[in-house]
Amino acid sequence: MDYRDIENQPIPLDEDFFHRLPKVDLHVHLDGSLRLATILELAQENRVELGAQTMECLRDLIAPGKVHRSLEEYLRGFDITLKVMQTDGALYRIAYELAQDAAAENIRYMEVRYSPILHTRNKLSLAAILESVLEGLRDAERDFGIRSGVIVCGIRDISPTVSLRLAELAVAFKNRGVVGFDLAGAEYNNPARDHLDAFTLILSNNVNVTIHAGEAYGPDSIHQAVHYCGAHRIGHGTRLREDGDLLNYINDHRIPLEVCLSSNVQTGTVEDLSRHPFRFYYDLGLRVTLNTDNRLITDTTMTREYMLAHAHFEFLPRDVLNVVMHGVKSAFMPHEYKRDFVIATKAEVKAMLVEQAKKAMVPDSAPLTRDSAVSKSPGSSASTREDGR
Ligand SMILES: [Zn+2]
């Protein structure tokens, strides 16, 4: 049996499979992806008042995974995390632990984004703020084998002059760990073109661009990101479906969308996943990728995002392969490395899918019922597998 025999066959794909699957995460915010215990420890070490002394209180305060009414409301959780992210030691530790957690679920490559300007309360220099995170990621690569890069974020609702300073920082650290520049923050009423000077500098220095757009505002925001600011990828792009012409352009130019399913529900961008355009985009051939956005604030992992996508959009083996490869191909990585990464990942995923299909065909080899193996509802097949354990 080889991959061609099974690529269009429904096979049971469970949590263990998605955990083992080689993955990339191209859209993950450092300040939204801390360990809860680390926040408490850092607060004690640095005498920071959080308004919570125990894990339970802190969990209540941050409310990971909570469904909010808007992006602005969702962003409030960051007020707490940022309090403990103001020393070089804390930034190093948080970056290191994020990469460790990602490696533990077989994320092979990750692009971590954050805005250094939000970490200057103790007068750390922007360069020191960047170097601490890069060092944490480098040490995690040495210890756990996960490769990574940093995306520097300008913030939509902070002055364009600050964005320009951050763009200068990103240019200075190009080829030293920074792989791109982004614009994050409150999208409504804060158009990307206000930050044009930053993007002009970034593009004239041949630095990659991704921009949060089409999340809390319509397709105009995506249009600006691509045509004014030169975005090579779009963060979210959820509302792209409202403009068919722009959608075709994004598709024709293979501009990847960094989709974050759980986050889109929690920010109120979509009412629930049955209304998410992921499957619609995928079927049209758009280069859709899956990402976490915020491991803590959104209370998710890449494994969970794949499980959700599979449960709602019914992945066949070829869909699993395509979505993984969309992520790999969209990485801001030099082509000479990416070529080998693409070849190796494709071979590994194909082999895993064939193995999974073989397991499903041997009745006694796994605690799967015949029904679950051909289930039309992948979500229920996953739960059947878990019940059988
Ligand atoms: Zn984001």
Image (cartoon, grey):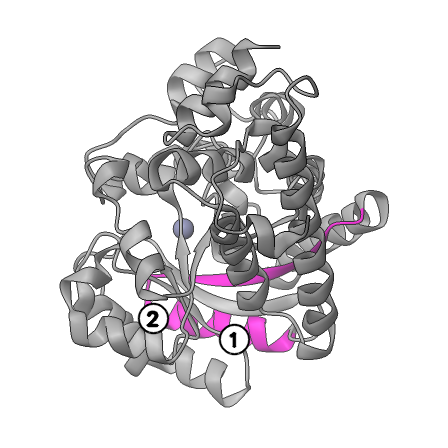
Residue 70 in percent (x, y) is at 21, 40
Q: Which residue is mark 1?
A: 208
Q: Is residue 123 visible?
A: no
Give whichever of 145, 115 is nearer the camera. 145
| Magenta-drawn segment | 145-172
Left or right: residue 38 compared with residue 8: right
Figure quadrant of residue 353: top right
Residue 241 in percent (x, y) is at 20, 61
**Quadrant (top left, top right, bottom left, bottom right) of the C terminus:** top right
Labels 2 and 1: the sequence-earlier one: 2
Residue in the image at 28% along x and 37% along y = 273
Q: Which residue is mark 2?
A: 160
Residue in the image at 32% along x and 51% along y = 278
Residue 184 in percent (x, y) is at 37, 57
Residue in the image at 58% along x and 36% along y = 18
Residue 123 painted magenta? no
